Image (spheres, rainbow, N blue to C red):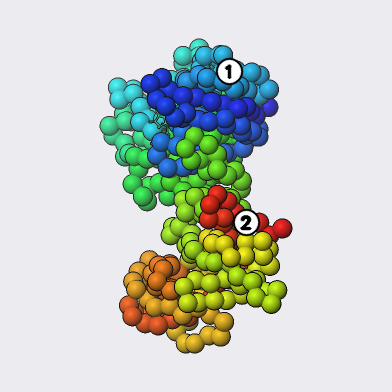
Amino acid sequence: MADISLRNIVKTYPGTERPATENISLEVADGELLVLVGPSGCGKTTLLRMIAGLESPDSGTVSIGGRDVTDLPARQRNVSMVFQSYAVFPHMRVRQNIGFGLMLAKVPKEKIAERVERAAELLNLGDYLDRHPAQLSGGQRQRVAVARAIVVDADVLLMDEPLSNLDALLRLQFRSEFKRIVRQIGTTTVYVTHDQAEALSLGDRVAVMRDGRISQLGNPIDVYDRPADSFVGGFLGAPPMNFLPVRVTSEAGRTGLTLGELSWAGPEHLASFTDRPVLLGVRAENITVSTGDVPGSLPAEIDVVEPTGAATLLTCRLAGHEIKAQVPATFRGEPGTRVSLTFADPAVRFYDSETSLLLENA
Ligand code: ATP
């Protein structure tokens, strides 16, 4: 068992005022692939380095496999890491690069050869074992760094933006390869990225971080579908969730919403927010755009049309607010076209304007 348990981790770097991580508690299950995602400076790397033992928390505990490792140095934690600036040794062939950790651990030669071959096979590096890094592409070099990390049989695999140096296509290829590999080796893995698409595609669960705290932790589909606050909704997704500052009304016992001159029916669970502003959150793919008049829809005007290949993204003006909607690539419309927008009600979320927290349907 190599589950990871973080309890109330606080870390403030000397000479800084704000904690890099502020009272973080987190459990990673044995064999789980957990992704830490968030904007630059939110504390992802700091948290990863504390799991690795490269940084010490000011308070709180780190346990791996039920063992409190808070005061143990990195080399006694049996963790394996791949950093953003992955270093492969240029003077060593791929074979030696991958087997380096095993050689340091004085594993017998035949065992090293066996494990290196197996890792190379997993990472499609079998044909390159006798090459030097200079004779490899960036993506292949990256795979060497990953192979070296997985070959050592660590309890825990820690990855810090390992794909950041790859171009978009390679990242995409590597992403699915990496997911397959981690599933095959079954090692508990914590993976840091600032790329929300990478986080959603890789993680068994995703922890969205902001300002040294975890804003939301959950499986990718839930976190995307039901962001716990407007920050998470705005961080995940391309485009991000749309937010409209609506006002809650009540007339004859019926809850309604207004946006400028527009008004429409709202969900009953907002009744306690009557006469107050809330944020309506809706994702682009949950808006239907029609060119004709649709009863009960909201009148808007197309501002920008962006084909993205599989679908087209429209930027529309709705009661003076910008809103992005996704339509099929076959959609025909241009800037200035008047359209009707319909929101898919079950996918619409509401957020407290002051706290930015999700207002749950009680
Ligand atoms: P990025 O995506 O840019 O790598 P991150 O989310 O990994 O960011 P961290 O590197 O963990 O963020 O940094 C968290 C905060 O701690 C930041 O405000 C950063 O400036 C600060 N910080 C990080 N390392 C140090 C250090 N060695 N000394 C002082 N402050 C630091």
Q: Residue at x 57, y 55 (%)?
A: 352
Give the residue pinned by disc 1.
70
Distance in Å between CA atoms under marks 2 and 1: 37 Å
Q: Position of residue 320 (x, y in %)?
A: 40, 71
| Helix, strand or loop for disc 1 | loop
Query: Can you name the residue that lies furthest to the bottom here?
Result: 292
- Please name the amino acid that badge 2 sits on: Leu
Relative to 66, say whether 360 is above or below.
below
Left or right: 45 as drawn, with respect to 133? right
The total of numbered circles placed on residues is 2
Relative to 131, say whether 60 is above or below.
above
Q: Position of residue 144 (x, y in %)?
A: 41, 32
Front residue of 190/178: it is 190
**Image disc number at residue 359:** 2
At label 2, counting other C-alpha atoms closer than 10 Å, the crowd grade (few under 14, some 14-19, many 20 or more) is some
Query: Can you name the residue that lies furthest to the left here?
Result: 134
Q: Position of residue 90 (x, y in %)?
A: 30, 25
Left or right: 56 as drawn, with respect to 7? left
Residue 27 location, quadrant: top right
Relative to 149, say whether 327 is above or below.
below
**Badge 2 residue CB within 8 Å of ligand 1:** no
Q: Is residue 150 visible?
A: no
| Helix, strand or loop for disc 2 | loop
Front residue of 305/264: it is 264
Q: Residue at x 35, y 31 (%)?
A: 85
If the image is split into quadrants, where does the C terminus sit? bottom right
